[in-house]
Image (cartoon, rainbow, N blue to C red):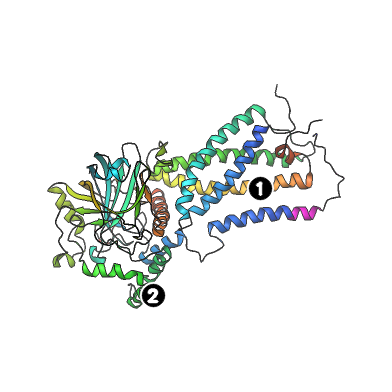
Amino acid sequence: MTDPSFPAPGRICVPCRLAAIGAVVLAMAGGFAYVAGWLTPQRLTTHRIINAFEADNGSHPGFRRNHAKGVCVSGYFDSNGNASALSSAGVFAPGLTPVIGRFAIPGGNPSAPDTSVPIRSLALMFTQHDGEQWRTGMNSVPVFPVHTPEQFYQQLVAARPDPATGKPDPATLKAFNAANPETKPFQAWVKGHPPSSSFANGAYYSVNAFRFVDANGQARAVRWAMVPETPFAPITDAQKSARDFLDADLAQHLQDGPLRWHLIVTVAAPGDPTDDATQMWPDGRQQIDAGTLVIEHETSQDDGPCRDVNFDPTVLPAGIKTSDDPLLAARSAAYSVSYNRRTREEALNPNLHHPQPNGDRS
Amino acid sequence: MTPTHTHFSPLQRLLHWTMALLILTMLFIGIGMVATVSHAHATLIAIHRPLGIAILLLVLLRIGARLKRGSPPLPDDMPAPQRVVARLSHLVLYALMLAMPLIGWAMLSAEGYPVTLFGGVHLPAIVPHDVALFAVLRALHTYLALALFLTVLGHLAAALFHGLIRRDGVFSSMARGARRA
């Protein structure tokens, strides 16, 4: 080698330099471990949220960790072009966009009775002609019970079943609600609105705020809702004592023809909170009917087209952006962990046909 | 015949140090974004995809530069086992630098996720939508990332060992150009 610097050996402190090298390597490894969360087990991570779901609901390999019980649907969105002034997304140009969706109920147990929660959900994936996608997960309640991922985790912990009764301890839940007054609007809404008798006649809300960006780059905060053409009817007494009625009811409706919802976009006024899913926006905001969601078919989630879709609400086409709502990033991050776990379970056990201990189909 | 150089070419050095920075950034972003529930998640993911594609393009260029120009010979007095480790570790580094972005791209394809770079610019799927394939690729992406991080740490330690203790010119062959006589 032509390198000129070969000082006499022994002039350097070899142990000092070895220690310096070790320090550099250790600092880097330590930084990596810190970012990964390995050094701070108390920090809230995606893994801890999904672990909490598993602790609350038990092990159900191959199923989503939340909204585990559901059914695949498919159809299309027929845009009327009204929202294209607000968002440059291809889905809002006049015309049809194919849609894959999933009706479900919240909770991590795929064989829970339909009456276990007063909420239904609708998740959709729009695939634009340019290949971009819009994925959204909506609930039949327009507000969320908690404001932050940390509160969400605490709520999961509070809802953990008592080993003695197999059910969450009402006192613990009550204490959680008392300590978190943000839950009040959600509870008030649920109290004042009975669950729908069907997936078909419920409205589904984006819950979180998003931003629509127009062709000039101007962004506006929005929320959206799918509002059914089928008139709302509350759950019947017969349904209240049934385990499973939502799936069969949907199949019945679809035998009579496609079901339609209108995509109603609500535009925030200045000052409306965009980072707080526990708060509704006041009445009187500008609303736009952007077009019609037409659901034509339903399929079991065991092998339907929605099974392998992670309805990550941050998968958005150009023209739609996330808001500053802290729940959105957490939803995306946690859904991903749920998806990774259930697809791994599917891969490790290709014969996983979702056996239902109670004989019910999910 | 290929002439023997004592130092890496300016292009090779530029590629090496740029990629060193990008790959370390990428590893920290990757391990952080899968754990965090904060707003950082969205930002980190938005950086992770285009940065991965940038690294893929750079590694292709780098492999070309390496094949064309080669590398300076290792010092004559380096023990044979160390030479073997040096050669192998570089092969592993090149293989992982190439594999990681491809696996990431394939993994999103198998998941049916849009591979968005920025705005509406997205890449086509390179494998079919298949969750069993996704599960394999997703696990590989994590394990190989950890393997890459460990190899990078070993590479860093070895480079510093050459530069600070052996002082045999191996470190300076990448740190600077040859001194003019």
In the orientation shown, which residue stands out farthest toward the left?
A256
Q: Quadrant of the C terminus of chain A?
A: bottom left
Q: Nearer the viewer, residue A215 or A159?
A: A215
Image location of residue A126, percent across then percent down: 30, 44
Q: Which mark's residue is nearer the viewer, 1 or 2?
A: 2
Q: Quadrant of the N terminus of chain A?
A: top right
Residue at the location (57% across, 57% down)? A33
Q: Is residue B133 above or below residue A166?
A: above
In magenta, the rendered stretch is: A5-19
- Dot 2 falls on which chain? A
Res A191 quadrant in image = bottom left
Pointer 1: what residue? B154
Q: Amino acid at mark 1?
A: Gly
In the orientation shown, which residue stands out farthest toward the front?
A270
Q: Secondary structure at mark 2?
A: helix
Q: Nearer the viewer, residue B46 or A41?
A: B46
Q: Nearer the viewer, residue A231 or A263?
A: A263
Q: Specify the label residue A179 is tagged with.
A: 2
Res A113 quadrant in image = bottom left
Q: Is residue A53 left or right of residue A44?
A: left
In the orientation shown, which residue stands out farthest toward the top?
B1
Q: Is residue A89 above or below residue A336?
A: above
Q: Is residue B80 visible?
A: no
Image location of residue A167, percent across then percent down: 32, 72
Q: Secondary structure at mark 1?
A: helix
